[in-house]
Image (cartoon, rainbow, N blue to C red):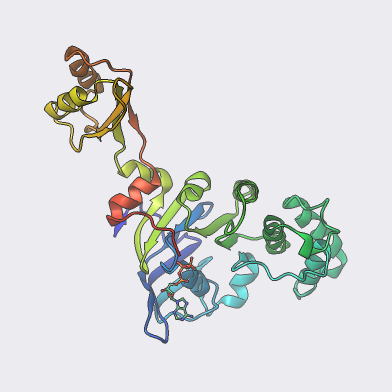
């Protein structure tokens, strides 16, 4: 496994060591996981369906026992310290449990009443603040069954936010949402994070992680492939050099002569501008030299630049596989 930066497990909000889960049927769902989630991060737990994300989250929340290895949440061992840890953690796992016949507000009042530590005298204030936090004040009186999926997710988040939390754990929070609903959740996650809450969210959507997360761990088939700051991961994968020109064949030849690797010509119609891409040259290489060589060879360079690597490029580079979200 490639470690991108050394976050300190002692101060981490979540730290696992060799965490492993083999289900009774023999399925090895999580295999020797060493996860370190720094305080204050928005940590994306990324992986295709079936890669072990939900199983990991269940272990972190003390819902299932690991087969071996350890998990610490807020510095305490899980599942042993569930009773002291869980009140400080807001969780949204596998969709919120809501009563459709109750209004959003009444759902929250019920939820709050189920918390023995919650003072009944301040219940209404707490519920109003939580509704406001997720932008559901106006819809608070509506029956939950009339809510859109995005509103239901936000109500679930409101329930998780009735008490101040040090950590929020969200399992696929935008699953099934339309683009508008996804945006709402992303905005909310950013706001919560800016208040200092650590957010751990799982997703099988690469660009979602890129948009909202500061850190990422990538899972595939129960194993951790890499973890660290999102920016480091994408930067560790070199982007591609892109030349826009109508003279694609000549440009490709010159780039190869200049030592650029993996030169690819995008097919275009006769006379139209095309794109020639290649491996980004090493940082010490002057890009101006490359442009000079192209121009000197009489190539009509219309565009020249480096495309930043995406998280998807990084995933493909790390696993040698495409990021398959089917299933
Ligand atoms: N209760 C269970 N018993 C047996 N096998 C299970 C159980 N739950 C999950 N698995 C298997 O463990 C593997 C990991 O599943 P898990 O749900 O943790 O993955 P995931 O990354 O969360 O995927 P998804 O996004 O589909 O939930 C899968 O092969 C799954 O079939």
Q: Nearer the viewer, residue 110 or 62?
A: 110
Q: Nearer the viewer, residue 120 or 218?
A: 218
- Mark count: 0
Q: Quadrant of the N terminus?
A: bottom left
Q: Residue furthest left?
A: 257
Whether residue 4 can be seen here: no
- The picture quadrant for ligand 1 comes to bottom left
Q: Residue at x 48, y 64 (%)?
A: 14
Q: Quadrant of the C terminus?
A: bottom left
Write down the quadrant of residue 51 in the picture. bottom left
Q: Is residue 305 above or below residue 233?
A: above
Is 86 positioned to the left or the right of 28 in the image? right
Is 16 positioned to the left or the right of 122 in the image? left
Write down the quadrant of residue 143 in the picture. bottom right
Whether residue 229 can be seen here: yes
**Residue 139: horizontal and vertical position, in percent?**
82, 54
**Residue 237: horizontal and vertical position, in percent?**
30, 43
**Residue 129: horizontal and vertical position, in percent?**
79, 54
Q: Nearer the viewer, residue 117 or 203?
A: 203
Q: Residue at x 78, y 51 (%)?
A: 132
Q: Residue at x 82, y 57 (%)?
A: 140
**Residue 21: horizontal and vertical position, in percent?**
41, 78
Is 9 positioned to the left or the right of 95 in the image? left
């Amino acid at each position: 496994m490639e470690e991108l930066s050394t976050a300190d497990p002692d101060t981490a909000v979540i730290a696992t060591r060799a965490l492993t889960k083999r289900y009774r049927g023999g399925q090895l769902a999580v295999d020797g996981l060493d996860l370190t989630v720094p305080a204050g991060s928005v940590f994306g737990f990324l992986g295709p369906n079936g890669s072990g994300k939900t199983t990991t989250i269940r272990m972190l929340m003390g819902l299932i026992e690991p087969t071996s290895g350890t998990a610490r949440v807020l510095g305490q061992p899980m599942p042993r310290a569930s009773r002291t840890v869980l009140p400080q953690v807001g969780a949204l796992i596998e969709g919120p449990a809501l009563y459709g016949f109750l209004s959003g507000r009444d759902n929250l009042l019920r939820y709050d009443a189920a918390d023995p530590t919650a003072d009944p005298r301040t219940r209404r204030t707490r519920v109003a603040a939580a509704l406001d936090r997720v932008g559901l004040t106006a819809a608070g009186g509506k029956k939950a069954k009339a809510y859109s999926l995005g509103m239901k997710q936000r109500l679930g988040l409101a329930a998780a936010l009735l008490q101040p939390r040090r950590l929020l754990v969200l399992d696929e929070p935008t699953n099934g949402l339309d683009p508008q609903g996804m945006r709402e959740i992303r905005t909310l996650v950013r706001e919560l994070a800016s208040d200092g809450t650590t957010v751990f969210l799982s997703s099988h959507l690469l660009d979602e992680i890129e948009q909202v997360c500061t850190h990422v761990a990538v899972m595939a088939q129960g194993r951790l492939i890499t973890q660290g700051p999102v920016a480091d991961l994408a930067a560790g994968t070199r982007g591609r050099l892109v030349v826009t020109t109508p003279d694609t064949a000549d440009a490709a030849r010159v780039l190869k002569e200049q030592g650029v690797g993996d030169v690819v010509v995008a097919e275009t119609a006769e006379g139209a501008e095309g794109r020639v891409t290649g491996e980004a040259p090493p940082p010490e290489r002057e890009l101006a030299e490359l442009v000079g060589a192209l121009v000197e060879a009489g190539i009509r360079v219309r565009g020249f630049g480096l495309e930043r690597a995406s998280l998807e490029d990084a995933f493909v580079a790390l696993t040698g596989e495409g990021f398959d979200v089917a299933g």
